Image (cartoon, grey):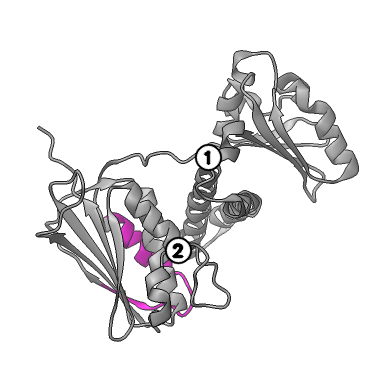
Amino acid sequence: MTTGLAVLDAELRVRWANPALGERLGRSAARCHGAALTELVPALVDAAQRCLREQRRLHLREMTLGSAPALQAPAEVLLQPLSDGTLLLELLPAAATNGADYGPGLRTLAHELLNPLAGMRGAAQLLERDALAPAQRELASLIREEADRLAALAARLLRPPSAASLSAFDVHEPLQRVAALLAAQPDAPRVLRDYDPSLPPAQGDAERILQLLLNLARNAHEAGARTLTLRTRAEIGTRLPGAHRVLRIEVQDDGHGVMPELRARLFEPWVSGRSDGTGLGLALARAIAREHGGELDYAPADPGSLFVLRLPQAEAMP
């Protein structure tokens, strides 16, 4: 995460801090632990005391945190009292509020997700530590890792848009992760794997591609799919800008499919075929594909839906 997070006790001493907070303050997270806010960020002491006293959330914009070089850049600060008498401190670079590509609604949602995700992670850690059965520990570990991944996604939505960090990765690894996450859900569809084991690596950010594929798989699950097919191939005759070779990943399901009147606008934000849907999953999925110089397309299947992701193949090292 790039969002600096800390939990302060009633005396405004740090009980926990993440590495991003240490980086923001010019010290390690370990050196933040136990330190008083008066030592770390004196400019926030009055606001923190008021937050605890009034038991209400405070949102401070364009704050200069101190005179030290690490603290001179303006920051956005969020202070929120927690139910156990502690205080959650979040530090965001001021530029993080300028990511207009995602829209204020999505940035607000991303911010509101961070607190429950932190709670989920802590609960999962306790379960992972105390679980007696190996299968229970494995599920708790899965929850913890997903909470970390979603927190990183939320933090990314709060940052200004930037190019994806691209490197070579095996496309089957995120697909296997998708299958494992689906298997942990109740009433999960059966997953069929149709992989080309000789497929070369793709060029991209494996975590971002995992998010894209999860969005597709969860849409299929919510559309009533009983079978989900994950397929990989090398694609011949298709070109992507700047890519000599293209890899093809298919996610096919036998669910209800997409209504014909929605197909032309399927990847637009806020367009959904479900009354309880947000219409964000596919819009984010296509945005991730295009960040990678790839493309995501939809085709109706009989029954169900077929989504085709095309990614550049990683170039061989000279």
* Label 2 element class: loop
Q: Is residue 59 left or right of residue 285?
A: right
- Give x and y (percent) for residue 220: 40, 75
In the image, residue 215 above or below residue 185: above
Residue at 90%, 40% (x, y): give it.
53
The reply, left or right, for residue 213 in relation to residue 113 is left
Q: Is residue 265 visible?
A: yes
Which residue is depicted at the point 57% across and 54% down? 106
Q: Position of residue 284 (x, y in %)?
A: 44, 57
> Which residue is farthest right?
53
Q: In the picture shown, does residue 112 fall above or below 274?
A: above
Q: Mark 2: which amino acid? A: Glu
| Most foreground residue, 179 or 135 | 179
Location of residue 171 by image quarter:
bottom left
In the drawing, does residue 22 fall left or right of residue 171?
Answer: right
Does 15 lie within the magenta span? no
Assign a secondary structure to mark 1: loop
Q: Amino acid at mark 1?
A: Arg
The quarter of the displayed image where residue 190 is located: bottom left
Spatial separation of the CA atoms under disc 1 and disc 2: 21 Å
Q: Which disc, if any, is residue 159?
A: 1
Q: Is residue 157 left or right of residue 188?
A: right
Magenta highlight on residue 181: yes
Residue 160, image x, y percentages: 50, 39
Give the residues drawn in magenta, as a range: 173-192
Circle 2 Cα neighbour tier, 10 Å, few/some/many (<14 / 14–19 / ≥20): some
| Residue placed most toward the observer, 167 or 170 | 167
280 above or below 300? above
Q: Which residue is mark 2?
A: 268
